[in-house]
Amino acid sequence: MTDTTQSTTESPQTHDFQAEVSKILHLMVHSVYSEREVFLRELISNASDACDKLRYLSLTTPGLIEGEPQFQIQITVDKKNKTLRIADNGCGMNEAELIEHLGTIARSGTDQFAAQISGDAAKDTQLIGQFGVGFYSVFMVADRVDVVSAKPGPGDGEKAFIWSSEGGGSYSVAPAGDETALLLEGRGTVVTLHMRGDAEDFLDEYRLRSIIKSYSDHIAIPITIIDANADKKEGEDSETPPEPVNAVSALWTRPKSEITPEQYKEFYHHVGHVFDDPAITIHYTAEGRHEYTVLLFIPSTPPMDLFDPKRQTRVKLYVKRVFITDDAELLPGYLRFVRGLIDSQDMPLNISREMLQNNTIVASIRQAVAKRILSELKKSSEKDVPSYETFWEAFGPVLKEGIYEDFERRDDLINLARFRTTKSEGWRSLKEYVGTMVENQTAIYVLHGEDAKKIGSNPHLEGFRARGIEVLLLSDPVDAFWVQALGEYDGKPLTSVTQGAADLDAIPVSEKPSDEKPEETPLGDEALGSLTALMKEALGDDVEDVRASTRLTDSPVCLVANEGAPDLYMERILQAQGGAAPKSIHVLEINPSHALIKELAAKAEAGGASPDLENTARILLDQARLLEGSALPDPAAYAARVTEALLKSLTG
Ligand code: ADP
Ligand code: MG
């Protein structure tokens, strides 16, 4: 560590970066990321967050900002020494916080991010764009970074600390000496970048101005630039602070017409700590019982931790432009992908985070804003189908949680839902489904499965396809839950095609089961009766029943759950969760038109029960289990039976 600037007698403590940080640093130092200027956006964003935090703390402890209540971000350019310095008078960090915040990454999704770093420059560059790496981006432009920081308020002598790193595997922390003088009013943070040889162009004041204008104009705290080497001109008043580079007004308080899409986007990046484009921007002021301004964004790509159970909504609460908290749960859980802020005019400024939990204003804002978001989504679904479908692809699985969680908005949510079905390649709504039901169809049919691509080839679908009946193909884990909770749509029950006796007889077969095969004449009732009885006997307690099927056209058999029993897929989910799933005994349905079944019936008629018949029945049962996605209870026995059958067929 080069700590020549260190003026304390105490030697600095050296620490290793957390493994993920090391990986990210390596990426930063070696990346060919073309937008290196984002390091400034990151530092300014952190400085602004720090000022927001201190402003909140000072609501209850005004002494913290005594003497200097004005927050500011000051950038000092020193061309001679090739340094760039970013100072803020925000909340600062103590020694433990420097180690915690600048030595590890607390942000969720970091480990997934680090795991994806491949060493392939092009891929990794894209990753940086998607994830954003905050503070560590400084190492794209600097070969050494010093951070001097101090918490506000009365200190105990050893208050300021200096963190320093060259971006390798380690950093050092020590009490600050002379560097303490760099702090603005003795508090906050000063980040000094010792610029890399290939990044000296960032020491140009005009370049810096234009970067700030394009990335940080929305920051509500004045940002000023100072030239460290400028001579004071004769008569110049050194007390006059330079003009801020940014507009210095909270973006959401400006009229919509004066905000460009780029400004919205940059603000979204800042407030959401994300780096994609917002798909939908919602900006309005509610007046009435409560007055508040809403600026929310729906992302275009899902964050890495969307399904992390710990993940909560992260919409920020402001009161009269003062940041209060980002864990007020301002939105229901199924809208946890929404980013942005809500600024209330009526809440007391000194509201504590604890008080928010039962606050009636928060509750009423939560209601109203959730409603507004859903209506914006509805608008988007009508106005711009392709982009709505992209949204649905990314966030549909989360939104569907609302169908069982939010009774009040269930109808809105179900109408926003889109589905893969047997009818078309694209997405379908339930409204479209119901509008195109075939004659005599009384139910909405669904099929659950783990894999969207695989469920489409499930044999259960054959009879439905042959009759032109559309089936919803549901492959998200939440589907099992909302289908149960909803029960019906537009008066039509949601029915699983793997459950109960499919009553398809009232609907004629409209398509030939398969192009080549001629229509088979099904087994007569008598032959069918004796075959099902013999098979039931052979399979014993392993099946609930054996019966003829209307579901099948091409396959010989399939398994179905009994009426009233949980759907087969639901049962597997319950089992996977260790819940109390009933023992899986199902009904084996056989296809009376299938050649194999007809052969089997002939054999049964001739010879009655036999080891051959039992073997075939067992192979068919296992086949049905495999097709429906469950594991075989005894794979070795299955393999042995198939081998035996093959041998027999080969040896004739
Ligand atoms: P993020 O801002 O997304 O949390 P960063 O890598 O940008 O991630 O920063 C990491 C953490 O370091 C911040 O969350 C904050 O706690 C701390 N930090 C960074 N810069 C400052 C600053 N100027 N003042 C106070 N704390 C800071
Ligand atoms: Mg940051």
Image: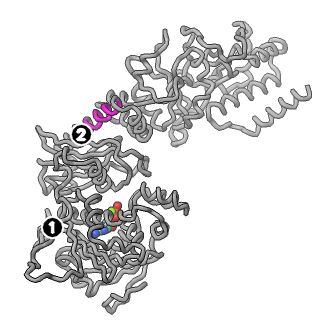
| Left or right of residue 36: residue 524 | right
- The residue under label 1 is 243
Q: Residue furthest front?
A: 234
Residue 324 placement: quadrant: bottom left
Res 564 seen here: no
Q: Amino acid at mark 2?
A: Val
| Left or right of residue 59: residue 385 | right
**Disc nearest the viewer among 1 and 2:** 1
10 Å neighbourhood of mark 1: few (<14), some, or many (≥20)? few
**Which residue does the image show at 12% across and 48% down from the upper left?**
345
Q: Which mark is residue 195?
A: none
Pointer 1 with pointer 2, Cβ within 8 A:
no
- The residue under label 2 is 369
> Sequence-wise, which precedes: disc 1 or disc 2?
1
**Residue 387, relative to residue 443: is it above or below?**
below
For the residue pair 290 and 535, the one nearer the viewer reads as: 290
For the residue pair 643 and 283, the one nearer the viewer reads as: 283
**Which residue does the image show at 14% across and 62% down from the upper left?**
59
Q: Position of residue 314 (x, y in %)?
A: 31, 51
Q: Quadrant of ligand 1?
A: bottom left
